[in-house]
Image (cartoon, helix red, strand yellow):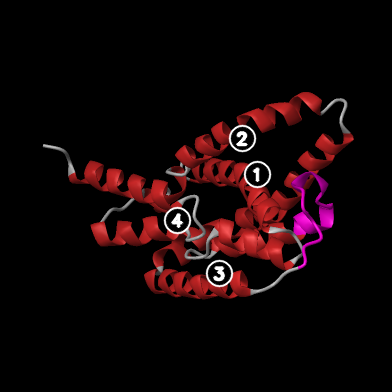
Amino acid sequence: MVDQPIISALVLGIIEGLTEFLPVSSTAHVLLAGHFLGFNSPGNTFAVLIQLGAILAILLVYAQRLISIAVSLPTSVQSRRFVLTILAGFLPAAVIGAIAHDFIKTVLFETPMLICVMLIVGGFILLAVDRMKFEPKYHDVMDYPLSLAIKIGFCQCLAMIPGTSRSGATIVGALLLGADKRSAAEFSFFLAMPTMVGAFTLDLVKNR
């Protein structure tokens, strides 16, 4: 007979897979489902560690693009600038996440009501922004200025509040800052790579 924790982990894995690439906060859904199933993990690490699959999926989808950028780094100013832009966008989350990690995991992750409220608020914001008319100034992630990347990076920090979608926060932030929808979504996925790896690594270090 299969142990209940294994069944719960499989259910949570399915939920993660279905919600990770939608602007609906996969972490929030995993946390709420975990509360409902009575699934406990030390320091709530499971909700972050389960995203390893998502990291690998993004790397596979963008593998050809990433290889092309890596190969052209020595000769292409645009490629070097793009990598610097991604790192600049990642910096706010790296600093704030490292400082507030314990509070996020022990307080925010343990507050189901907050998670539910943020899911609802986030849904209304997405609907409102989708109805807005924009005149985008930025159409290619390779041409994003550093200042725009840093601002989007601060928008990403809102996702440290469980229930706030990381992709939703970055895409909405990028749209409001002048990016078009396609490049906003693409930048969000590129920004997810160092962010997810960073969160994954920090959780491993904190809970070893």
> Is residue 117 shown to the viewer in this render?
yes
Q: How crowded is the residue under tag 3: few (<14 C-alpha within 10 Å), some, or many (20+)?
A: some
Q: Nearer the viewer, residue 100 or 64?
A: 64
Residue 46: tell me if it is visible.
no
Q: Marks 3 and 1, Cα distance to the nearest angstrom? A: 21 Å
Q: Amino acid at mark 2?
A: Tyr
Question: Badge 4: few (under 14), some or many (20 or more) residues near its Cα, within 10 Å?
Answer: many
Residue occupied by mark 1:
190
From the image, tell me which residue sits under label 3: 126
Find out whether the residues at labels 1 and 4 contact each other: C-beta distance under 8 Å.
no
> Which residue sits at x=47%, y=50%?
20
Q: Amino acid at mark 1?
A: Phe
**Precedes in sequence: disc 4 or disc 2:** 4
Which of the marked residues, 1 or 2, is nearer the chain's N terminus? 2
Q: Residue at x 35, y 45 (%)?
A: 13
| Placement of the N terminus among the 4 image quadrants | top left
Q: Earlier in the sequence, mark 4 or mark 3?
A: 4
Q: Residue at x 65, y 74 (%)?
A: 132
Residue at figure coordinates x 73%, y 27% from the top left: 68
* Highlighted magenta segment, given as a residue range: 135-150
Q: Quadrant of residue 106?
A: bottom left
Of marks 3 and 1, which one's residue comes earlier in the chain?
3
Q: Vertically, is 42 above or below 114? A: above
* SS class, disc 4: helix
Marks 3 and 2, Cα distance to the nearest angstrom? 26 Å
Q: Nearer the viewer, residue 49 or 43?
A: 49
Q: Which residue is mark 2?
A: 62
Q: How many marks?
A: 4
From the viewer's perspective, is the residue at label 3 or at label 1 nearer? 3
Front-most of residues 57 and 138: 138
Answer whether labels 3 and 2 touch (C-beta < 8 Å).
Answer: no
What is the CA distance from the residue labelled 1 to the residue labelled 4? 19 Å
